[in-house]
Image: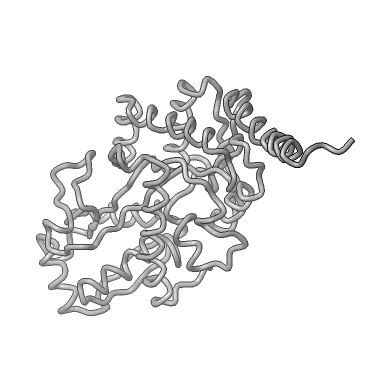
Amino acid sequence: MKLPRRRFLCLAAAAAALPAAARASRADAYPSHPITMVVPVPAGGQMDSIARIVAESMRTTLSQPIIVENVTGASGTIGVGRVVRAAADGYTLLYGAWATQVVNGAVYALQYDLVNDFEPIGLTSITPWLIAAKNAVPANDLKGLIAWLKANPDAASAGTSGAGGPGHIGGVLFQQLSGTRFQFVPYRGMTPAMQDLVSGQIKVFAVTARSRLAAAPDIPTVDEAGLPGFYLAPWHGIWAPKGTPGAVIAKLNAAVVDALADSGVQQRLIKLGSNIPARAQQTPEALRAFHKAEIEKWWPIIKAANIRAE
């Protein structure tokens, strides 16, 4: 029997709506079992510590545990790549950072798109750096340091975690903005570099952010100290694979917001040297816009300096 065309179209529309209804039902039940959060760096560092603090607190809102899994290698690209290939169901998340979500795109030929292959969930922390030097450097403030560096090109050296690390990239921008020149000395990570610096006793000139560091409010910002615009504040955020349902993203974002509003979480992050992003910066939309802006800012700097992955 041939159905009237109008009736057939209605049946077809209803059939097409079934997958969407099923997705909505699954989103309503989410999460029904533990979630995995991939952290693409080794356990024990600052990024890993912050990820575990946030994940632990998100459990309260989600009523399911978030299991942190460290998937390391190739400057984080292996862990990030794993999340790209994961099912878009909200059960595999990425805890990414400025280095993995911005810098790697300028120094590696990635097999994924840092913006379009992910669904942003929320920005979790911002960690400004400090401009510091040994006490032996003849300068009392940042302006004096810049004047000394200009008068003594290549007389100073800056310790970095290696080519493409935050210290290296930030040092390149510092040279551009201040008109100075100095050498970069790569260390196996920043801990040995800081040990060498601290062994000679240090003085701190400024924090590389628009606002002062919550853990050290007496240190002036670069704007206040004499190098306006020198903002170097590596940050962390959470993403899901592309195509993760909007309702799932909303639940995850609510868990992030609740975690960052917790005074205990705030104090633990402050002790790790991080600032909590403002509430308006914690939305998925804000993270997407911020992420794009960071790529637009840093990729030209990195590429112009011919920084290559080691």
- Which residue is drawn at the image coordinates 55% and 25% (left, top)? 65
Identify the image's colour scheme: rainbow, by chain, secondary structure or one colour: one colour
Q: Does residue 71 appear to the left or right of 181 in the view shown?
A: right
State whether residue 201 appears in this view.
Answer: no
* Residue 255 pos. (x, y %): 44, 29
- Which residue is drawn at the image coordinates 17% and 56% (left, top)? 205
Q: Does residue 42 appear to the left or right of 144 in the view shown?
A: right
Q: Does residue 91 appear to the left or right of 165 in the view shown?
A: right
* Residue 277 pos. (x, y %): 31, 41
* Residue 74 pos. (x, y %): 58, 58
Query: Which residue is more in the foreground, 29 or 201?
Result: 29
Quadrant holding the N terminus:
top right
Query: Which residue is more in the foreground, 90 or 106?
Result: 90
97 vs 17: above or below? below
Q: Residue lying farthest front?
A: 4
- Which residue is drawn at the image coordinates 66% and 44% (left, top)? 86
- Which residue is drawn at the image coordinates 36% and 42% (left, top)? 125
